[in-house]
Image (cartoon, rainbow, N blue to C red):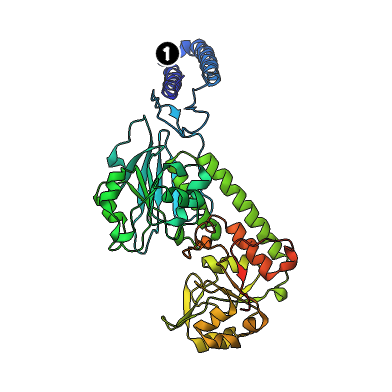
Amino acid sequence: MPAQDLAQSTFRVKRETSMDMTTPIRPQSWAFLLSARASFVLRRDNMKSVLLALILLLIPIAPIAAQDGNLTDGCITDFDATVDYFPQKAEVIDAGNLTVSYHGHYKLVRVGNAFDGAPAFDYVLVQCGAPAPPAEDFADNAQFIEVPAGRLIALSTTQLPALSLLGVIDHLVAVDSGFYISTPEVVEAIATGEIAEVGFGAQVNIELALELAPDLVLSYGFNPDTDAHPILLEAGIFTALDASWRENSPLGRAEWLKLPALFYNQEARADEIYAGIRTEYQALRELAASIPDEEQPNVLLNSFLSYADAWYSPGADTYVGQLIHDAGADLALPSDDPAGSQPYSFEAAYAEGWEADIWLLETFGVQTAADLLALDSRFADFAAFQSGAIWNNNRDENPNGGNNYYEWGVVSPHLVLADLLAIFHPQLLPEHEFSYYQRLSAA
């Protein structure tokens, strides 16, 4: 029985009982008899009411029906408003700037903090074959798209691993540039002309983008004056912002692989992949936590940049800072802003960091100790230089210098953490094979 009918039946029961209780008062001589009769009638009607209520409770109210799984290909052919078309739902655990809610035949995806001062961006993902909800129910900037989506342009290399893992990379028709890309199937498709290059930022080739007719563009934001997304939106192309780079948590950043999954109804696959990443990361973090504080090394990060006249050191709550902590080490140059980076002069960095046990670089083109000295000969005075404990995150680079640490490393924080744990505490992972870091050679 529908819920509204149950409510009406209950109302009738209450109304009938109320009418019996308002029996007019008779003359006193009839009072006892009428009182006894009224009591009997009341009890009898109450029993009827109770029995009726019990019967109604035993009649099941039909729940909203659900499919066996999300449709990852094609559209529904017979829309039913009572059906849950997304029985496999994504649960966002660690990403702070991504939310999703489900509403039967559509889902509302919200991206927050995409860049400094950015509003929230809402995307209404409607199951193909179902009616779109009224636009007036959403924010003015909300965009609507049917899912599963089709043709896709991805404007960041960090988005490509997620597409590969989710099995939807065959939808990719263009990237910004193939120069720094490491994902093998994308490199091959660019070489054969199957995937185009549309440029990036304000220089994005709108004519080519329109010719490719994408259903969806995954972009990112730094500054609306120089970004691609305002230009794409003005051209009428659905564009979603990927704010993964704004996440300070390594796991939170990796969880953004669920964003493209939402557009292709691949929630089940995304949740399974991310659960595996999260489990491995947490296991490594717990392993590192077994190291006593006094055995945790001091780690120097980055290097002096002559063009900026500064040595930037990240705070403890930044992406890299959390990786260092989770791998069982301390920062040699702490930042006054835990969530940001602090510039040091060379002299200040030397005074506080020259005795650091280990030195981690994120420096392009540095493969050897000689390469590092070519940047600044004063680096030879650091203890880590003299002991040979300098590592760079450029183990996996493509021929153009594209660093896979910034591509697959984003969705593989467990592998990055394993590298760091093996550097800081090699006895914990004696058989470790490095994915992203390598020790600088002597020459």
Vertical order, 111 against 285 (above or below) = above
In this orientation, which residue lies closer to the viewer: 248 or 208? 208
Percent from the top left, x then y, of residue 6? 45, 21
Q: Residue at x 63, y 66 (%)?
A: 420
Residue 293 vertical position relative to residue 44 in the rendered view, above or below: below
Name the one closer to the observer, 211 or 345: 211
Instruction: Residue 254 in the image: state x and y as whole percent.
Output: 52, 55
SS class, disc 1: loop
Left or right relative to 204: residue 181:
right
Whether residue 316 is visible: yes
Q: Residue at x 51, y 32 (%)?
A: 69
Q: Quadrant of residue 3?
A: top left
- Measured along the vertical axis of the image, is residue 57 above or below residue 304? above
> Does 431 sit above or below residue 151?
below
> How many numbered discs?
1
Instruction: Give the quarter of the figure containing the C terminus.
Output: bottom right
Q: Name the amino acid, label 1.
A: Arg
Residue 117, x across and y down, in percent: 34, 63
Q: Is residue 169 left or right of residue 419?
A: left
- Splitting the image into 4 quarters, where does residue 419 fall? bottom right
| Position of residue 390 measured from the top left corner of the image (x, y, whole percent) | 61, 76
Q: Residues within 10 Å of mark 1 (few under 14, many from 20)?
A: few
Using the image as rendered, state which of residue 156 and residue 413 is in the foreground. Answer: 156
Q: Is residue 212 left or right of residue 247?
A: left
Residue 91 visible in the current orientation: no
Q: Residue furthest front?
A: 192
Q: Which residue is mark 1?
A: 26
